[in-house]
Image: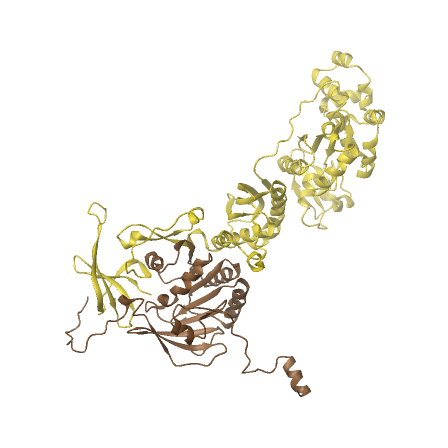
C-alpha cells in the first residue's frame, strides 16, 4: 500500500512576504475575486480579523490595515522553490497548486526507516520558508490532502500532526471519516446539495460503494471519492528539477536606492550558494532581473570569469554592477537566473609557499571580473599585436578576452623602433623640432579603403620629449606618438 | 637605560636615526650603476613616485623591472595611461603582452579604487599609474595594500605639488639628458639625498639619445618643421 504525505501551507504568500522583517502593522491578503480575507497575520488576528471576512469588515476592525492582493502564481513559484529544496531528500514530489506539496513516501522508505524519519528530513526545508503548515499521512494522495486541510482548519499544532504520522491505517480511516466535505476538492454546488440531505462529513460518503455512488451522483464526484478512498488512481506529475537555477523574491517594500538591494540580493544569492554547493558547480554568468513598478524590468548581467560559489563574492560583484546602475522606478521584486554554470575544479595550493596560496589572494580571472564589474567591460583592456604595417592596425587595445589568454604565444616581432605612447589618432603638428632619425616610409596597399603613405621621423621637441612624427605626401606634418 | 627613556622608547616616542630597519628587499633596475645609486634597486612591495613629463624615457627606465615581473607570471597593470600603449615597444623589451592589463576610467575614484584592488589582489606584480593628485591618506592606503598583495605601485606624474610631500618610499625626479636620463632622488626612506645620477642609455637605446656631433662639424641651420 502506498504512503502519501501531504503538506498544506495555508498562508504561504503571507509567510514569504514577512520573511524579512516582522512588523506590528496588521497585514491581510485579500482575494480580489470576492474581496474576502484569505490570509492574515498574528497582528490582524489579534484585532479580531478572521479568514473569510470581507474587506469592509476587516477595515472596520482595524483602520491601519495593510492589504495585499492574493496572487496564486507567486505561491506556486514559492512551492517550486520548496520542491527544489526538498528534492535533495525526496524523489517523488508533486506540486499541488496553490498551497500544497505531495510526497510519495513508499519508494523512499528503503532509505529512511519510516514515515516519521522521512518527515524529520523534510521538516527543515519547510520551516525555512514558513512556520504555518499542516502535515498528514494517508494511503492515497487525495486522502492525505483532505486530512491536511482539515487539520489546518482545526488549527492543530504541527506536533500533533507528528503523532498522526504514527497512526495506523485504522486511525487514518477514522480521521478521514471526520473530515468536513468543504475541505475536499468537490465542487461547491455538490457540497451544498449534500449538506441539504444531511451529509457533511466524508465518512458518510465513503461508506457507500462506488457503484452505488455512480448511480446517484455525476462522474466527477465519483472520481474524487474514489481517489480519496484509494480505489481510483490520481494522475500526478512529479517535480523535475530544472538544469538552471531560478529564484524569484517579492520585496516587502519598494526599494528606490540600489545600495538597499544588498540585503534581499544576499538572501537570493545565499539560496544560489546552497544550490551550487550541492551540485559542485560555479556560477559564471547570472542574470538578475529587477522588476520595477510601472516600468519594464532592468536586467543586470553578473559575470565571473573564473566562476564563483560563495555568496559574499557574488554579492560583491553584483553590488559593483548595481552601483553603476540608476533605477528607473522603485524595485518591487528580484528574479535571479543562472545562465552559465561551470564545473568546479579544485586547484591545490602550494604547501611550501603559504603566501602564494593564502585565501585572500585573487586569481587573475577573479581580479579581471572584479574590475570589469566596477569599470565596465570596455575599460579593462589587453594589448595585442597584429602583423600589419600601419601603426593603427598593428597596435590594438581591445576588451580583455580571458579564454585565449593562456594559449596564444605572441609571435616574434621585428625589432622596429616604435613609440610606447601611441596617440589614438594623429594630431597636426606645428612646433619646431630637431629630427634625429628618419625618414621611415610606411605605405599601405593601394586597394585598401584609406591607403596611407607616410614618412615617419623621430625627433625631439623643445621639452626634450621624443616624438614620432610623420609627413604625408601632401606635406602636412602630424604627431603620432611619444617614446616614453 | 634611564627608566623614563626606556618608557619613551617602549612607547615608540623616540626616533633612532641610525638603526632604521625600513629598507626592504629590492629588485634590480637592470643597470648596476643605478642599483648602487638607489641602494639596491627598486624597493619591493612599495609605492614609488616618478616626477617626470611623458616621453623622455621614463618607461625605458622601468622596462627591465616590468619585464622581470611579467616573467614571474604576475600581471603588469597600466592604469590610466595618457594614450594607447605600443605593443611593439613592450614586446621588444621582452614584456609578455599577454600579462599586461590596461585600465581606463573617467572618474578619479574608480581609478584609485582599481589601483587598490590590483595591489591587494596578489596576482599583479607591478602597477604603473598616471595620475596627478593624491592625498597622503590615499598613499598610505596604497602602501598597506601593496604590502598585503606584495605588489609595487609606480606613480608617474608631472606637476608635483612641491608643498605636499607624499609618504612614498621612493620619489625620483627625471629630467631629459642628451645621453639618457638625469635621475635625482627627492626622497628615499632611510637614506640621505645624493647628487643626481646620469642613466646612460647610449648602449641600450642607441637610437633614442641625442647624437654628439664631432667637434669639427659646423652645424647648418636647423631644419624647420611645420
Q: Is residue A104 visible?
A: yes
Q: Is residue A373 above or below residue A102?
A: below
Locate the C terminus of chain A and report the quarter of the image it occupies: bottom left
Q: Is residue A214 above or below residue A168?
A: above
Locate the N terminus of chain A and report the quarter of the image it occupies: top right
Q: Position of residue B8 (x, y in %)?
A: 64, 83
Residue in front for this viewpoint, A398 or B178: B178
Q: Is residue A197 visible?
A: no
Q: Is residue A66 above or below residue B185?
A: above
Q: Is residue B160 left or right of residue A149?
A: left
Q: Which residue is pictured at 33% across the width and 61% down the height? A: A420
Name the quadrant containing residue B7. Answer: bottom right
Task: Please tell me how many numbered marks the rendered image carries.
Answer: 0
Name the quadrant containing residue A157. Answer: top right
Q: Is residue A47 above or below residue A167?
A: below
Q: Residue furthest bottom?
A: B2
Q: Is residue A458 left or right of residue B77?
A: left
Q: Which residue is pictured at 17% across the width and 60% down the height? A: A475
Q: Which chain is brown?
A: B
Q: Position of residue A397 (x, y in %)?
A: 37, 53
- Identify the colour scheme used: by chain
Q: Position of residue B126 (x, y in %)?
A: 45, 63
Q: Position of residue A216 (x, y in %)?
A: 76, 13
Q: Is residue A325 left or right of residue A448?
A: right
Residue in front for this viewpoint, A26 or B60: B60
Chain A, hue in figure: yellow
Residue in front for this viewpoint, A221 or B213: B213
Q: Is residue B214 left or right of residue A36?
A: left
Amino acid at each position: 500500500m502506498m504512503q502519501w504525505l501531504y503538506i498544506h501551507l495555508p498562508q504561504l504568500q503571507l509567510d514569504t512576504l514577512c520573511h524579512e522583517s516582522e512588523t506590528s502593522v496588521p497585514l491581510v491578503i485579500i482575494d480580489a475575486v470576492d474581496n474576502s480575507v484569505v490570509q492574515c497575520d498574528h497582528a490582524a488576528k489579534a484585532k479580531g480579523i478572521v479568514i473569510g471576512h470581507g474587506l469592509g469588515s476587516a477595515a472596520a476592525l482595524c483602520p491601519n490595515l495593510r492589504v495585499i492582493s492574493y496572487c496564486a502564481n507567486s505561491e506556486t513559484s514559492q512551492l517550486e522553490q520548496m520542491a527544489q529544496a526538498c528534492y535533495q531528500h525526496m524523489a517523488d514530489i508533486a506540486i499541488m497548486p496553490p498551497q500544497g506539496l505531495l510526497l510519495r513516501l513508499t519508494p523512499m522508505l528503503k532509505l529512511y526507516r519510516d514515515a516519521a524519519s522521512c518527515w524529520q528530513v523534510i521538516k527543515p526545508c519547510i520551516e525555512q520558508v514558513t512556520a504555518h503548515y499542516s502535515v498528514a499521512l494517508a494511503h492515497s494522495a487525495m486522502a492525505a490532502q483532505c486530512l491536511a486541510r482539515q487539520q489546518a482548519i482545526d488549527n492543530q499544532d504541527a506536533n500533533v500532526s507528528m503523532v498522526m504520522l504514527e497512526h495506523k491505517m485504522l486511525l487514518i480511516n477514522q480521521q478521514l471519516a471526520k473530515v468536513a466535505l468543504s475541505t475536499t476538492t468537490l465542487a461547491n454546488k455538490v457540497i451544498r446539495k449534500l449538506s441539504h440531505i444531511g451529509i457533511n462529513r466524508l465518512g458518510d460518503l465513503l461508506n457507500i460503494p462506488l457503484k452505488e455512488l455512480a448511480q446517484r451522483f455525476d462522474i466527477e464526484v465519483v472520481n474524487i471519492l474514489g481517489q480519496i478512498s484509494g480505489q481510483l488512481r490520481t494522475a500526478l506529475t512529479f517535480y523535475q528539477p530544472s538544469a538552471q537555477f531560478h529564484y524569484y523574491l517579492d520585496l516587502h517594500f519598494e526599494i528606490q536606492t540600489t545600495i538597499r538591494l544588498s540585503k534581499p540580493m544576499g538572501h537570493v544569492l545565499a539560496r544560489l550558494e546552497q544550490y551550487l554547493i550541492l551540485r559542485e558547480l560555479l556560477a559564471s554568468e547570472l542574470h538578475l532581473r529587477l522588476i520595477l513598478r510601472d516600468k519594464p524590468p532592468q536586467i543586470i548581467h553578473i559575470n565571473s570569469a573564473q566562476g564563483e560559489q560563495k555568496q559574499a563574492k557574488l554579492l560583491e560583484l553584483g553590488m559593483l554592477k548595481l552601483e553603476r546602475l540608476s533605477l528607473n522606478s522603485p524595485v518591487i521584486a528580484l528574479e535571479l537566473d543562472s545562465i552559465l554554470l561551470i564545473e568546479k575544479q579544485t586547484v591545490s595550493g602550494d604547501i611550501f609557499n603559504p603566501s602564494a596560496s593564502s585565501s585572500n589572494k585573487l586569481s587573475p580571472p577573479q581580479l579581471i571580473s572584479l574590475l570589469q564589474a566596477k569599470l565596465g567591460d570596455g575599460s579593462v583592456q589587453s594589448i595585442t599585436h597584429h602583423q600589419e604595417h600601419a601603426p593603427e592596425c598593428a597596435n590594438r587595445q581591445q576588451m580583455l578576452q580571458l579564454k585565449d589568454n593562456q594559449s596564444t604565444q605572441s609571435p616574434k616581432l621585428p625589432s622596429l623602433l616604435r613609440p610606447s605612447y601611441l596617440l589614438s589618432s594623429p594630431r597636426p603638428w606645428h612646433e619646431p623640432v630637431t629630427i634625429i632619425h628618419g625618414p621611415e616610409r610606411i605605405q599601405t596597399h593601394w586597394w585598401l579603403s584609406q591607403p596611407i603613405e607616410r614618412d615617419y621621423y623621430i625627433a625631439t621637441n623643445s621639452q626634450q620629449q621624443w616624438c614620432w612624427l610623420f609627413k604625408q605626401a601632401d606635406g602636412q606634418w602630424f604627431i603620432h606618438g611619444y617614446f616614453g | 637605560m634611564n627608566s623614563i627613556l626606556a618608557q619613551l622608547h617602549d612607547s615608540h616616542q623616540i626616533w633612532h636615526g641610525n638603526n632604521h630597519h625600513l629598507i626592504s628587499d629590492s629588485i634590480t633596475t637592470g643597470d648596476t650603476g643605478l642599483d648602487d645609486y638607489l641602494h639596491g634597486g627598486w624597493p619591493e612591495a612599495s609605492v614609488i613616485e616618478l616626477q617626470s613629463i611623458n616621453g623622455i624615457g621614463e618607461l625605458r627606465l622601468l622596462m627591465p623591472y616590468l619585464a622581470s615581473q611579467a616573467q614571474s607570471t604576475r600581471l603588469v597593470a597600466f592604469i590610466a595611461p595618457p594614450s594607447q600603449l605600443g605593443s611593439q615597444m613592450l614586446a621588444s623589451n621582452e614584456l609578455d603582452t599577454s600579462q599586461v592589463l590596461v585600465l581606463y576610467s573617467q572618474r578619479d575614484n574608480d581609478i584609485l579604487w582599481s589601483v587598490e584592488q590590483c595591489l591587494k589582489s596578489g596576482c599583479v606584480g607591478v602597477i604603473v599609474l598616471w595620475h596627478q593628485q593624491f592625498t597622503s591618506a590615499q598613499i598610505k592606503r596604497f602602501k598597506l595594500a601593496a604590502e598585503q598583495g606584495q605588489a609595487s605601485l609606480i606613480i608617474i606624474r608631472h606637476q608635483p605639488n612641491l608643498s605636499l610631500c607624499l609618504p612614498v618610499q621612493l620619489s625620483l625626479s627625471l629630467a631629459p639628458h642628451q645621453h639618457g636620463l638625469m635621475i635625482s632622488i627627492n626622497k628615499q626612506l632611510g637614506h640621505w639625498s645624493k647628487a643626481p645620477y646620469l642613466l646612460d642609455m647610449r648602449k641600450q637605446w642607441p637610437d633614442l639619445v641625442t647624437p654628439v656631433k664631432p667637434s669639427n662639424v659646423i652645424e647648418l641651420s636647423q631644419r624647420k618643421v611645420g
